[in-house]
Image: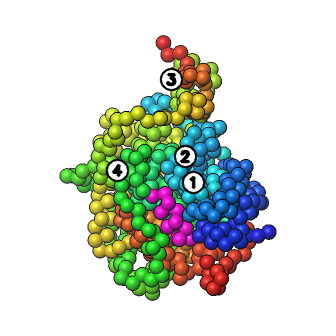
């Protein structure tokens, strides 16, 4: 039946490289664990490539709505103090980050 | 001690209006029960006793002035992924530990406008990624029917809280079954609205083309009440649909004559737990006795739904979770040498393993060279899955299926094998991908006394149909009234004419 998992999956995904693309640092154990699990998952999701999709339009979401605009008028947002209250580091006026250049 | 905690939303309203109890009594009673049960259950991440009691007193004061509203003074528990002003919203993640919502989600604002009291935040899989609530960064939640079993997920805290009468009703969110699965595993009612029916504004995004907020309740009437309040267009969510909101309670009738119920043959397959199959088959016979006609339908794309779902949902998650970078809210590692170092180590420290796996999978299927083979293909398969369902609805009004291939399983049983866990979502994800609505209703127990859920799937924006079918079935069975073993015995309430409330 369909509830079968690809057990002997070959290495398909370069985990450290993709993790870097996603701005994640992984330790050695995570790399090992994820490699096995993700190879299995990727091997499984490949089954969609068996479906004949010629001439089929891709579906991005379920509702037929396009380009929803609102009037370009000023609206009040959240107060700065409220927004900064959740920031890990700020100076009362803006978010602070480590030096960039 | 009174057992107000066992009441449904509509029973609360009746008793509050009669003056039999006050909102303060309700909330105090719930807090007492929460204190007693939480060490064994872990359904909540936080309970805001002070704010809840203040809201309850305000509701009681309004009532004394003759004011009323549909939820005046009625406490609701909220999954920790939906923003309630002033309360935490951690998404069960270390990366949002300490975060407090600066505003109400639209669904919350609408419940608040009807007088609801926001009691606390329920546990979940981190960022709603999971089917067991074991992926919470803080603690697991146990199934009230068997403490060794999972409550389902990702809205497992809401499911357990409602089933154990630690809440009158709760909100969950459903991306690929996260309301229906815990409702099924815990023996309560869960409704996933059609995509676009309830505003997503203020819901922390997991997969934006799939996420919906849905009620988790003790009966179908409560689901209709809460949906009716939350549904409707919201200019703050550009995917919310401007369709009129019908009177969902008017759809609740006790017979099913004239209704055609479809059984997708791909859902009754080898591998389906025999107890689950028996429960669902008996529910189908009960619907026939209520006047419904049963028709066989086919959804040939079903075997590809899980693959399409995990590609699309992970792709969207990898983009949505890019916002957690240590700049504007939540965790930031100390002593980062530059922004890249800050991003990478903050995210490494803040996210749990399942979230990392999905971010990596999502990044992979969107990356150069793989996008067409995975993401684009999955989007095309999604079109075919919707066509399947649309075609089925030419022959029937709603579909009847199991919510999941099994009832609740043991804690730890699948946590080391993510793919096995994903495969348990097979019956839930097609309705999500197609944007259709679906309901989970209790329909019996396995030989191990674990609840079974009947899924009623309806076409987009046809919530009245799934509510009608679910209600008629529920009202002629007693599954939803059964209480888990750790809880008090059944409570019977009658109105002045001795009719059951």
Q: Is residue B225 magenta?
A: yes
N-terminal of the pair, mark 3 or mark 1, is 1
Crowding at dot 1, Cα within 10 Å, few <14 / some 14-19 / many 20+, comes out as: many
> Residue B154: where, in percent of width, then height?
55, 54
Q: Is residue B159 magenta?
A: no
Q: Which residues are magenta?
A: B219-231
Name the residue: 52% across, 47% down.
B105
- Residue under pointer 3: B340
Looking at the rendered structure, the secondary structure element under dot 2 is loop
N-terminal of the pair, mark 3 or mark 2, is 2
Contact? badges 2 and 1 (CB < 8 Å)? yes
Crowding at dot 2, Cα within 10 Å, few <14 / some 14-19 / many 20+, comes out as: some
Q: What quarter of the picture does the N terminus of chain B occupy?
A: bottom right
> Residue B386: where, in percent of width, then height?
32, 59
Crowding at dot 3, Cα within 10 Å, few <14 / some 14-19 / many 20+, comes out as: some
Mark 3 and mark 1: Cα distance apart in space? 41 Å
Nearest to viewer (mark 1 / mark 4): 1
The one of B406 and A72 positioned closer to us in this rendering: A72
- Residue under pointer 4: A61
- Residue under pointer 1: B112
């Amino acid at each position: 039946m369909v509830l079968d998992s690809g057990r002997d999956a070959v290495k398909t995904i370069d985990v450290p490289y993709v993790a870097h693309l996603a701005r994640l640092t992984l330790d050695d154990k995570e790399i090992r664990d994820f490699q096995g699990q993700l190879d299995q998952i990727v091997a499984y999701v490949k089954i969609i490539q068996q479906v004949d999709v010629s001439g089929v339009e891709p579906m991005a979401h379920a509702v037929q709505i396009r380009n929803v605009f609102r009037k370009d008028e000023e609206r009040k947002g959240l107060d700065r103090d409220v927004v900064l209250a959740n920031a890990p580091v700020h100076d009362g006026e803006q978010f602070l980050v480590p030096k960039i250049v | 001690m009174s057992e107000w905690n066992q009441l449904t939303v509509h029973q609360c309203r009746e008793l509050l209006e009669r003056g039999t109890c006050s909102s303060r009594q309700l909330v105090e009673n719930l807090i007492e029960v929460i204190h007693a049960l939480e060490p064994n259950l872990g359904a909540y991440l936080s309970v805001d006793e002070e704010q809840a009691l203040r809201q309850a007193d305000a509701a009681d004061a309004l009532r004394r002035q003759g004011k009323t509203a549909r939820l005046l003074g009625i406490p609701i528990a909220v999954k920790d992924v939906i923003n309630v002003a002033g309360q935490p919203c951690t998404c069960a993640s270390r990366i949002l530990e300490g975060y407090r919502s600066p505003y109400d989600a639209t669904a919350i604002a609408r419940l608040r406008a009807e007088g609801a009291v926001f009691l606390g935040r329920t546990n979940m899989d981190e960022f709603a990624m999971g089917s067991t609530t074991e992926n919470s960064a803080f603690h697991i939640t146990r199934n009230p029917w068997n403490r060794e079993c999972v409550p389902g997920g990702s809205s497992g805290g809401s499911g357990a809280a409602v089933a154990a009468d630690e809440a009158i009703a709760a909100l969950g969110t459903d991306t690929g079954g996260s309301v229906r699965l815990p409702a099924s595993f815990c023996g309560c009612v869960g409704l996933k609205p059609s995509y676009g029916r309830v505003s997503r504004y203020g819901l922390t995004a997991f997969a934006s083309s799939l996420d919906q907020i849905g009620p988790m309740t003790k009966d179908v009437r409560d689901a209709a009440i809460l949906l009716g309040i939350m549904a409707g267009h919201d200019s703050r969510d550009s995917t919310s649909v401007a369709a009129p909101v019908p009177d969902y309670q008017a759809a609740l009738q006790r017979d099913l004559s004239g209704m055609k119920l479809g059984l997708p043959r791909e859902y009754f397959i080898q591998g389906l737990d025999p107890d689950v199959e028996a429960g669902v088959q008996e529910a189908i016979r009960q619907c026939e006795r209520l006047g419904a006609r049963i028709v066989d339908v086919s959804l040939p794309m079903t075997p590809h739904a899980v693959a399409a779902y995990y590609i699309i949902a992970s792709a969207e998650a990898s983009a949505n979770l890019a916002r957690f970078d240590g700049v504007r809210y939540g965790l930031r590692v100390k002593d980062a040498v530059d922004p890249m170092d800050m991003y990478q180590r903050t995210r490494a420290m803040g996210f749990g393993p399942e979230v990392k796996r999905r971010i990596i999978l999502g990044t992979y299927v969107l990356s150069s060279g793989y996008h067409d083979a995975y993401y684009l293909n999955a989007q095309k398969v999604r079109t075919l899955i919707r066509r399947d369902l649309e075609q089925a609805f030419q022959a029937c009004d709603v579909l009847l299926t199991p919510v999941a291939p099994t009832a609740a399983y043991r804690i730890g049983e699948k946590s080391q094998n993510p793919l096995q866990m994903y495969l348990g979502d097979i019956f839930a994800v097609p309705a999500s991908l197609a944007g259709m609505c679906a309901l989970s209703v209790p329909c019996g127990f396995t030989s191990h006394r674990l609840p079974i859920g009947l899924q009623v799937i309806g076409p987009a924006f046809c919530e009245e149909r799934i509510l009608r079918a679910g209600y008629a079935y529920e009202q002629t069975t007693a599954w939803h009234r059964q209480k888990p073993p750790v809880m008090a015995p059944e409570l019977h309430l009658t109105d002045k004419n001795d009719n059951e409330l």
